[in-house]
Image: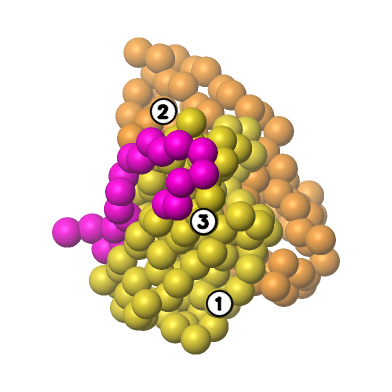
Chain colours: A yellow, B orange
């Protein structure tokens, strides 16, 4: 079984809909992250969480919210989806060290029409 | 502020050729960490290597090798005798105090290995 899982893997939705992307991990890591990938822009950090009670905004948090339900679960919500949120979304995890390697989930491809 | 530049947007080679992917970084830190990730056509991100700024030894893993040169702020990745399965987008990334330990990615290099 994969260490970091994301659901759904693909989602098509309409403008204005609320969407939740979920991430679960079995690696026992403390830290979890949400990124989005757009063509030619690499990955950009949306939110990150160092533990259940510590959640921080990343580079592009506007229009997104997150919830860390447990050490192993970190969900990303789009309260009112818009077309420019169409992207590939990745969840990642790492140990508690600041420079520890981040391991990524398989990604969720989201299309907002 | 930290920055990672991968100037090569796309590279196309014929199988068995050697290919080098360039990565140039900027940071004010004296201690920092560099990474390479591979994103095959299936879309997942696969960790390849992590290197800290104190260790300038080159690293070889099978057909993969990495050349880290602090003097030129570069961390280049070479694939020897490329194979079709090496076709992917490769990302270089950097973290350190300068970015509050957030992982800063380059824009990626798409490698196409033709049979």
Labels 1, 2: front one:
1
Instruction: Kindly state the secondary structure of the residue where label 1 is placed.
Output: strand
Residue B79, given in percent of the width and then of the height, sits at 47, 35
Res. A10 in view:
yes
Q: Residue at x 35, y 23 (%)?
A: B84
Above or below, comparing residue A40 to residue B70 in the picture: above
Labels 3, 2: front one:
3
From the image, tell me which residue sits under label 1: A55
Count neighbours of disc 1 (C-alpha within 10 A) and say few if under 14, some if 14 to 19, many if 20 or more: some
Please report, as a chain letter, where disc 1 is located. A
Disc 1 and disc 3: Cα gap in Å? Answer: 18 Å
Above or below, comparing residue A30 to residue B76 in the picture: below
Above or below, comparing residue B92 to residue A38 in the picture: below
Instruction: Kindly state the secondary structure of the residue where label 2 is placed.
Output: loop
Count neighbours of disc 2 (C-alpha within 10 A) and say few if under 14, some if 14 to 19, many if 20 or more: many
> Are the residues under badges 3 and 2 in a single subunit?
no
Q: What is the quadrant of residue B53 in the picture?
A: bottom right
Disc 1 and disc 2: Cα gap in Å? Answer: 36 Å
Q: Residue at x 40, y 56 (%)?
A: A20
Labels 1, 3: front one:
3
Q: Which residues are magenta?
A: A1-19
Residue A89, given in percent of the width and then of the height, sits at 46, 48
Res. B54 in view:
no
From the image, tell me which residue sits under label 2: B87
Upstream in the sequence, badge 1 or badge 3? 1
Q: Residue at x 54, y 69 (%)?
A: A48
Please report contact status of discs 1 and 2: CB closer than 8 Å, yes or no. no
Q: Which mark is residue A79?
A: 3
Please report contact status of discs 1 and 3: CB closer than 8 Å, yes or no. no
Residue B110 part of the magenta segment: no
Residue A45, given in percent of the width and then of the height, sits at 60, 58
């Amino acid at each position: 079984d994969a260490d970091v899982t994301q659901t759904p893997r693909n989602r098509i939705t309409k403008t204005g809909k609320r969407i939740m992307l979920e991430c679960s991990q079995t690696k026992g890591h403390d830290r979890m992250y949400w990124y989005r990938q757009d063509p030619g822009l690499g990955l950009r950090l949306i939110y990150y969480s160092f533990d259940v009670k510590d959640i921080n905004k990343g580079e592009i948090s506007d229009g997104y919210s997150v919830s860390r339900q447990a050490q192993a679960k970190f969900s990303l919500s789009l309260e009112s989806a818009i077309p420019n949120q169409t992207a590939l979304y990745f969840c990642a995890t790492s140990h508690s060290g600041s420079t520890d390697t981040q391991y990524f989930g398989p990604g969720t491809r989201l299309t907002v029409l | 502020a930290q920055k990672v530049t991968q100037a090569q947007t796309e590279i196309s080679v014929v199988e068995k050729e050697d290919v080098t992917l360039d990565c140039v970084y900027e940071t004010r830190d004296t201690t920092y960490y560099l990474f390479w990730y591979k994103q095959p056509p299936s879309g997942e991100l696969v960790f390849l290597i992590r290197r800290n700024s104190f260790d300038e030894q080159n690293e070889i893993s099978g057909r993969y090798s990495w050349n880290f040169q602090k003097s030129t702020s570069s961390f280049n990745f070479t694939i020897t005798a490329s194979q079709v399965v090496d076709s992917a987008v490769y990302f270089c990334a950097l973290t350190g105090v300068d970015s509050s330990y957030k992982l800063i990615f380059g824009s990626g290099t798409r490698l196409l290995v033709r049979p």
